[in-house]
Image: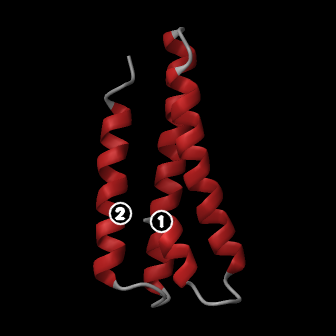
Amino acid sequence: MVPELTRRIPRGEGYLIDQSKRALTSAILNLAEGNGRTSPKERNRFFDISLASISETIACIDIFESFNQVSANLASELCSNLKIAYVMIRNLKR
């Protein structure tokens, strides 16, 4: 849903769209890479990066909402889903 959100943002906000795309991509790729590691220390390092990237994505959505570029309902739904993912990844850490 976040990629769909970025298509709704008006021109001139490309920097924030780019930032949100990079943060979301980082969250997904670091989760995948962490799952490929066997050392708990390495797994946790990648999971920590993924968690930070989810937090950054949430912050981007908050900014979109504060500039009235997305509705409060959509922002709330997206942030809620990201927070669920955050908790799930947090539970993967050993």
Callout 2 amino acid? Cys
Callout 1 amino acid? Val
Task: Give how far apart the Cα atoms at labels 1 and 2 are.
Answer: 10 Å
Neighbor class of circle 1 (other Cα within 10 Å; few <14, some 14-19, many 20+) is some
Q: Nearer the viewer, residue 51 or 6?
A: 6
Residue 29 point in image, percent of width and height: 59, 39
Establish if 39 lies above or below 9.
above
Q: Secondary structure at mark 1?
A: helix
Residue 41 point in image, percent of width and height: 53, 14
Q: Which residue is mark 2?
A: 79
Which numbered tag is attached to residue 2?
A: 1
Q: Nearer the viewer, residue 33 or 62?
A: 33
Q: Secondary structure at mark 2?
A: helix
Visible residue check, residue 60 = no
For this orientation, the residue located farthest to the top is: 39
Residue 77 point in image, percent of width and height: 29, 68
Upstream in sequence: badge 1 or badge 2: 1
Neighbor class of circle 2 (other Cα within 10 Å; few <14, some 14-19, many 20+) is many
Residue at horizontal 43 percent and vertical 84 percent from the top: 70
